[in-house]
Image (cartoon, grey):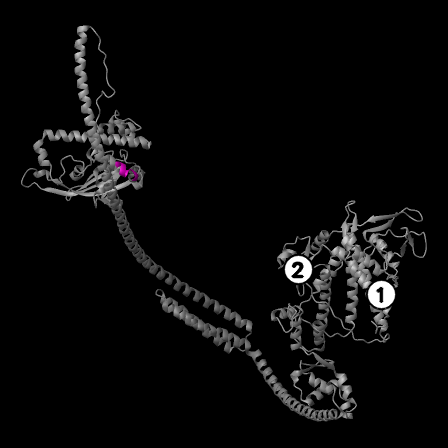
Amino acid sequence: MTDMGLADSEKQDIYSVVAGVLHLGNVNFEESGQAQGVVSVTPASRPSLDKAAQLLGVDPARLEESLITRITQAARGGAQGGIVRIALRLDEAASARDALAKAVYSRLFDYIVLRVNQALPFSGSQSYIGVLDIAGFEYFQRNSYEQFSINYCNEKLQQFFNERVLKEEQQLYQKEGLNVKKIEFVDNQDCIDLIEAKGSGIFYLLDEQSKLPKPSPETFTLEVYAKNKNHFRLAYPRKSKLKSHRELREDEGFLIRHFAGAVCYHTDQFIEKNNDALHASLEAIVKQSSSGLVRSLFDDAAGGVGATVAADGSVRKAGGGGSKIGTGKLAFISVGSKFKAQLAQLMDKLRSTGTCFIRCIKPNVRMVDHLFEGADILSQLQCSGMASVLDLMQQGYPSRTKFDELYQLYKGRLPPQLSRLDPRLFCKLLFHALGLNENDFKFGISKVFFRPGKFAEFDQLLRSDPENIAALVAKVKSWLVRYRWRKAQYCTWEVVKLRRKIAWRREMLVKVQKTMRMWICVKKYRPRIRGLAKVQSLRNRLSSMNDIVGQLKADKDAAKKSVDTLIAEVDGVVKQIKSAQRMSYAEIDAIYSKLSAKFDASFAELKKRLEQQKVREEQERLRRIQEEMERERAKKADEERQRQQAEEEKRAKAELEERRRREEAERKKQEEADRKAAAVLQKQMEEEAEANRKQSQDQEQERLDRELALRLASEDANQVEDLQGAGGGLTRGANVLQKRAQMGNSKYDLSKWKYAELRDTINTSCDLELLAACREEFQRRLKVYHEWKQKNKQRGAASGAAGAGGAGGKSEGSRAPQSVLENAVTVEGAVAAQRQLAGRIGEPGDPKSQRYFRIPFARPNELNRGTEADQHSGGLWWAHFDGRWIARQMEVQPGQPAVLLVAGVDDMSMCELGLEETGLPQKKGAEVTATEFDREWEKHGGAAVLKQHRAAVSSLFLKKNMK
């Protein structure tokens, strides 16, 4: 400061002002408990307030009062006006403190810069060298208005860098015609427009919001989003990579994608930090400061009200008393607008000067020496656009000079024959004389450009001594002689080439004459030549017609004769054209058209005959193929049907066998359970017999006692009471009780129905339960009938019965093979078997409840019964059960007609036993498939039998299939 001409007292004043600003920044405020909204200085910061007032040369009380209140003047207060003092809110007091500190420090900084400029001796110099050191790109966890302004400045300087280094350089290459590959770079103009554009820019929206009576940061943030909707550079905080930023609401901040990366800004203090104005009270006290330096700083303060505040609090305007002054409200001076204007002046000054750029990088985030973090450094270089710059320098020509500058450097030492040369030609001769590589430089329109790293040759040309320049001039003269000699050679070669071209043109003239003569001749005879060519072309069609005639099998001679006629006509037309002296092309074309029509008609007729012949042959061939395919298809279908039928029968047999095994296993288990139940029942029956015996003894004793009592009563003329115990009646057997219980459980009592009523109900009713009950009753009566018949037959013909019985035989009138009747289970076993098979038999009429059986039987020969020739004739007994009861029955014996019986028609001759009573499901190999049974049934005329007795059939399954 001493070198700049500052005295010790001035330095002391500067230090005092800086210290006062520092102490002023330590002053804090709090809400007083005396009244709501009243602000006061905190006790802890009062020493800082007193020290700041002392250093700035103001009264501490007035400073405190001006920081927490402001004065205003009523609109109608007379000459003096009504003075009103308004208390400031807590945030307004802090803003007033910051505004005063910034105002004092800013004017002090300007004062120091002014003194430095005054100390410089070159006040009238037009040329200067300036150094601009700018702050780097800033981004923190919390970014406010300061970071926003700094990053905006970096965006402007980055755009200037792109324009000066990349854009203007490529424009120069294009203007000079160097054909350098275009280098793409990121243009950040859209980001700058987002910040400073009028009407929608962030600075503009911030100023508009600050001018409102009650500005709100939330309203400002939402307005930024609304005015810049779908802008690429603007985004919501939730899109930030940092978790703390994603937690911000949309009205608490915004995210801007700068050229160096995305930064999230908190907008809660944007409005406060954008205001840089002082209200009248604060400016008045600094203007009345006891420090001369402080007073001088605010003498010409822009925006000041020029008023003084007296000790009594009255307000007087400087330079005249009693005049009306402003209200004293804190005016609005936009920091952003001022910063934008100053930055615009800086950019204008930079554009008016030649600039050199020094790019600085941060080697590591820990700020230690000799440590380079490659990934972070590479990211910094890429964000600053250095990759595009290096690409342009690699492909471009960073060093250049004008042709005139080189020419003027050598003009004084050139001989007369060289001084008359064009500067561009001279530079070309000079470079060739030096032996420079043509890839290291390139000539533009007004400049010569050098590749990177070739500046040594360039410097040699600009800084050569006289001896070297003379040597270069000699080389240029020598190269000029060689250049002119080569030019003379090229001229000689061009003359020789021109002479040869003249001779070639003469040859071409002769060829043109020859061509014209030929053309005249062709024009004269072309109609005949064309006509003959067209007529001769018809002969080519004759070969096709002869081939077709050779393929015909009918009317071949007539077709041959028509072809010979056409050949004769063609020969006649050829002879006519050749012999005629004059014949126009139209006449020849008419003759050709007529002859061609005859050829077309004959060819079409022959082709039609051939096509018809081929169609007939093809039809015959297709018919034979179709017949063969039909035979083959029928054969394959038959084989496939047989294969499928065999597979189906095999599968059905396997299922039947598997079901038989399951039923056999279940039957064994059931038999074991029945045996156990029978043992228990036997024990119960023995106990019941013993109880009945005792009861009989008691009853007999009771009877004797009663008789004795009656005799005594008759003698004494007394009465005898008839007493009977609780267990006095006879007890029925277990079998009788079980049968009565089964009849009692039935829904219908059909024991008194007639046979006709049962048969009509079976044939006409749709009630499944009633049908089942009728069928049960009908089968029960059949069993009773057959049992009665068999007993009477055995008593009436004992000897005949001995001859009718036999091992495996079948007696006359039997309904089933003897093996089936003999193996019929008992009543208890039938009930158990019925209960076991109830879940598997299903309802009558259901396809799944149909069972088919086939067993062999042997019957005695009726003609030789009782003789030596008595033999047994064997056969097969087939049975179809619909649910529990038999639906169809068939007996097949060799050499005899089959016996076919249907339920509802032949009930008296069919097996009356239920499926569970026959024991057929337990016989191995007895059950067959439905296909086998139906095939055998159809074979012996079963379909006719069903059709004949269709109305009387009682099986629901057969009725459904016959519909």
Residue 645 point in image, percent of width and height: 28, 50
The residue at 16%/37% (across/down) is 822
Q: Is residue 37 left or right of residue 583?
A: right
**Does residue 807 appear anywhere in the picture?**
yes
**Does residue 334 appear anywhere in the picture?**
no
What amino acid does circle 2 point to? Gln
The residue at 24%/21% (across/down) is 727
* Foreground of the two, 89 or 797: 89
Q: Earlier in the sequence, mark 1 or mark 2?
A: 1
Classify 10 Å Cα crowding around label 2: few (below 14), some (14-19), many (20 and above): few
- Where is mark 1, residue-wise? 13
Which label was assigned to residue 56? none
Q: To which quarter of the image does residue 309 belong?
A: bottom right
Magenta span includes 835: yes
Q: Is residue 29 left or right of residue 124?
A: left
Q: Which residues are magenta?
A: 834-839
- Where 415 sits versus 633, above or below? below
Q: To which quarter of the image does residue 229 belong?
A: bottom right
- Where is mark 2, residue-wise? 141
- Where 866 sits versus 75, above or below? above
What amino acid does circle 1 point to? Asp
Count how many numbered circles sit on residues in the image: 2
Residue 314 point in image, percent of width and height: 90, 51
Residue 693 point in image, percent of width and height: 18, 24
The residue at 74%/51% (across/down) is 216
Pick the quarter of the image with the N terminus: bottom right
Question: Could you say whether the residue bearing mark 2 is in a helix, strand or loop?
Answer: loop
* Foreground of the two, 904 or 331: 331
Pick the quarter of the image with the C terminus: top left
Q: Residue furthest left?
A: 868
Question: Could you say whether the residue bearing mark 1 is in a helix, strand or loop?
Answer: helix
Residue 831 point in image, percent of width and height: 24, 34
